[in-house]
């Protein structure tokens, strides 16, 4: 998102095709999901939160308080925080936010949640994802499982992740680029999302054990990939 914002600010004439930006409207890349009429279009990796919340409940059935480590300077992360507050609040669940301004702050932010939350959820936050090993270190110390929106985070410490297949996202973005290269104006192409029906579930038994939980057989059976 920060990269796309910089590029869009730099040119109003060269076509710009963004990819994997959670909320391009809030990031001010485009004014709406309709054709922008400008030089910008692209494909979002925005995830519906309902399946994410369902996964949290399946991983920790007694969950009441959900930690959220995020970068206050990333609009994609602050947008998810507000959505979480609304959707979780309607289900009697609480969000405990822990801001991490820099990647070096992630460990401290995670540790600040000790004794306050039943699990920690991470979104597609560039700053947090880049420091996932620090997050995992804190999770093991606190025996608090990590649930991620990025499937690559499972091999780096998350117990489970329900996320976009970025290969498919890349192909869809590539199709938009081809349309532009063939002469279609970027501003005539509406911004789009990846199909929410194609989300992948990854699970790690090792990370579950390290954070003090056991993943149910139902979750394991529905996973695309189970890492031992």
Image (cartoon, rainbow, N blue to C red):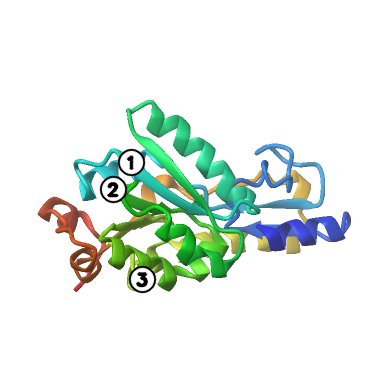
Which residue is rendered at x = 22% and y = 68% of the image?
210
Q: Is residue 37 left or right of residue 19?
A: right
Distance of mark 1 from mark 2, alpha carbons?
6 Å
Q: Which residue is mark 3?
A: 137
Q: Is residue 96 above or below residue 133?
A: above
Label 2 sits on a secondary structure element that is loop
The image shows residue 159 at horizontal and vertical percentages of: 28, 62
Q: Position of residue 15 (x, y in %)?
A: 79, 58
Looking at the rendered structure, the secondary structure element under dot 1 is: strand
Q: Which residue is mark 1?
A: 65
Q: Residues within 10 Å of mark 2 (few under 14, many from 20)?
A: many
Q: Which residue is drawn at the image coordinates 17% and 58% (left, top)? A: 213
- Depth check, front residue: 34 or 20: 20
Earlier in the chain: of badge 3 and badge 1, it is 1
Q: CA distance from mark 3 to mark 2?
A: 16 Å
Mark nearer the N terminus (3 vs 2): 2
The residue labelled by disc 2 is 118
Point out residue 145 in the picture as x, y percentages from the top left corner. Answer: 28, 58
Q: Are marks 1 and 2 in contact (CB under 8 Å)?
A: yes
Q: Is residue 140 above or below residue 221?
A: below
């Amino acid at each position: 998102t920060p990269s796309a914002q910089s590029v869009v600010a730099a040119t109003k004439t060269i076509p710009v095709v963004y990819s994997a930006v959670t909320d391009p409207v809030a990031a001010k890349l485009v004014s709406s999901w309709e054709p922008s009429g400008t030089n910008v279009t692209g494909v979002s990796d925005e995830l519906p939160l309902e399946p994410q919340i369902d996964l949290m409940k399946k991983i920790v059935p007694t969950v009441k308080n959900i930690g959220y480590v995020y970068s206050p300077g990333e609009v994609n992360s602050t947008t998810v925080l507000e959505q979480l507050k609304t959707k979780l609040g309607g289900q009697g669940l609480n969000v405990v936010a822990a801001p991490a301004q820099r990647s070096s702050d992630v460990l401290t932010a995670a540790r600040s949640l000790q004794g306050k939350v039943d699990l920690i959820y991470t979104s597609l936050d560039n700053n947090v994802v880049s420091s996932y090993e620090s997050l995992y270190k804190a999770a093991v110390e606190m025996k608090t499982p990590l649930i991620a929106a990025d499937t690559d985070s499972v091999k780096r410490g998350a117990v489970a992740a329900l996320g976009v297949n970025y290969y498919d996202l890349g192909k869809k973005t590539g199709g938009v680029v081809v349309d532009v290269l063939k002469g279609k104006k970027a501003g005539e192409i509406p911004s789009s999302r990846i199909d929410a029906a194609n989300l992948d579930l990854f699970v790690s038994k090792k990370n579950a054990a390290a954070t003090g939980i056991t993943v149910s057989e139902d979750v394991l059976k529905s996973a695309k990939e189970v890492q031992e």
